[in-house]
Amino acid sequence: MRSLMLATLLSTLTLPLALHTQPLHAQGLSGTVEPGSAAHQAQIERFRSPAPTASRLVKADEGFLPLPATPADFSSLRYEVNGQSFSLDDYMAQTHVSGLLVLKDGNILLERYGLGNTESSVWIAYSMAKSVTSLLYGAAIQDGYISSLDTAVTDYLPALKGSAYDGASLRDLLHMASGVQWNENYADPASDVGNYPGNNVVQFLDFMKNKPRVAAPGERFNYSTGETDLAGVVLRAAISNNLATYLQHKIWMPIMESDAYWATHGNGGGERGGCCLFATLRDYGRLAQFVLNDGVLPDGTRVLPEGWIAESVAPSPADDGYGYFWWLNGDGTFRASGIYGQGIYFDPEENMAIVVTSAWTAATVADATQHRNAVFRAIDGFVN
């Protein structure tokens, strides 16, 4: 049965792949680099190019969603970290920001670039792609591919019967609460996230099948890129298509301006549900506006079930700071986040979003995280 399922998954390829072969997890997580060093510059170049990652094209179309520019003056904005006051210029320089976009009511209030990026530059999303996978789960429910999030994972992937994932539901996956062991410590050379076979879907499923259970499904939150990659494989089985193809038809072609790329499990593999879309800053902004519009396209087409976003950002039973692959701030705002400083902040009550892309000097940097979160709050308060 496993061979049949994997053959079915591989037979659904419908778009050509970019001919890149190095698995993404082998390129990132490289420890700390010195700011401005050759290693940091190499990291920046890697972040703005899908190569050498195995990836699949997500095509845009000519009818993109306009984002009118109505510039606001942010020169007086200040924010505080540890009792010190900083400006947006300080933030961009100190945390190596490549792009900063502020949207309010579908209008661009601020658009800035750094590190040599321009409006046409693509940049890696890292784990912001998890939130895109969450959106596609909503689309699959709207289209009837998935009847209920309480469906067992093994209904879509029988190869996992008898594994620790036997008994876990799709909802458990989206909450990162399957109860299956996973080490996401980016600084640990022996971690799962640094060593799992991300460039081959057969090896990946075998790897996940052999992980032990450490809690009952639904009881314990454990952040796991492996689990979200598995959610991508499940979704691909549910829709009988590539995630990139589905994203292209449901969201990208209707509203996006530029082509994007989505990292795959090697050449010929499915998209990684947990990582690594490459898109422009403005298109990340359009994605944010799509979320703020509750998954409704400009022509009125509903891509997501009504109320899907609200359900997605409701606190999970296992962790009140996490929803369906979204981070929750506890005050009605929420965010998509990726390592090395990628983030989209949403304030749905104010119809506002902030997009930031960065090249932090390590996967996680406590000081840079403080600055990013403080900037999000300061901009929200400044605008509203």
Image (cartoon, rainbow, N blue to C red):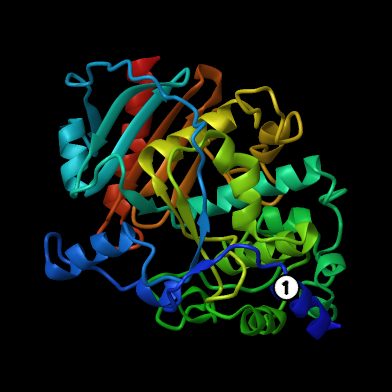
Task: Quadrant for the N terminus, please.
Answer: bottom right
Q: Is residue 306 left or right of residue 21?
A: right
The vertical placement of 337 against 162, above or below, is: above
At mark 1, the secondary structure is: loop
Q: Is residue 342 left or right of residue 106?
A: left
Task: Quadrant for the C terminus, please.
Answer: top left
Q: Position of residue 128 (x, y in %)?
A: 49, 50
Q: Nearer the viewer, residue 167 or 23?
A: 23
Residue at image point 63% right, 43% down? 320
Q: Nearer the viewer, residue 325 or 129?
A: 129
Name the amino acid, label 1: Ser
Q: Position of residue 284 (x, y in %)?
A: 44, 40
Q: Is residue 105 left or right of residue 173?
A: left
Residue at image point 87% right, 48% down? 147
Q: Residues within 10 Å of mark 1 (few under 14, many from 20)?
A: some
Residue at image point 39% right, 23% down? 380
- The answer to whether residue 154 is visible is yes
Q: Nearer the viewer, residue 151 or 247?
A: 247
Q: Nearer the viewer, residue 381 or 42?
A: 42
The vertical placement of 176 against 209, above or below, is: above
The vertical placement of 186 against 124, above or below, is: below
Residue at image point 20% right, 44% down? 114
Total numbered labels:
1
- In terms of image quadrants, where is residue 189? bottom left
- In terms of image quadrants, where is residue 181? bottom right
- The answer to whether residue 84 is visible is no
Q: Which residue is mark 1?
A: 11
Q: Position of residue 52 (x, y in %)?
A: 37, 72
Q: Position of residue 362 (x, y in %)?
A: 29, 63
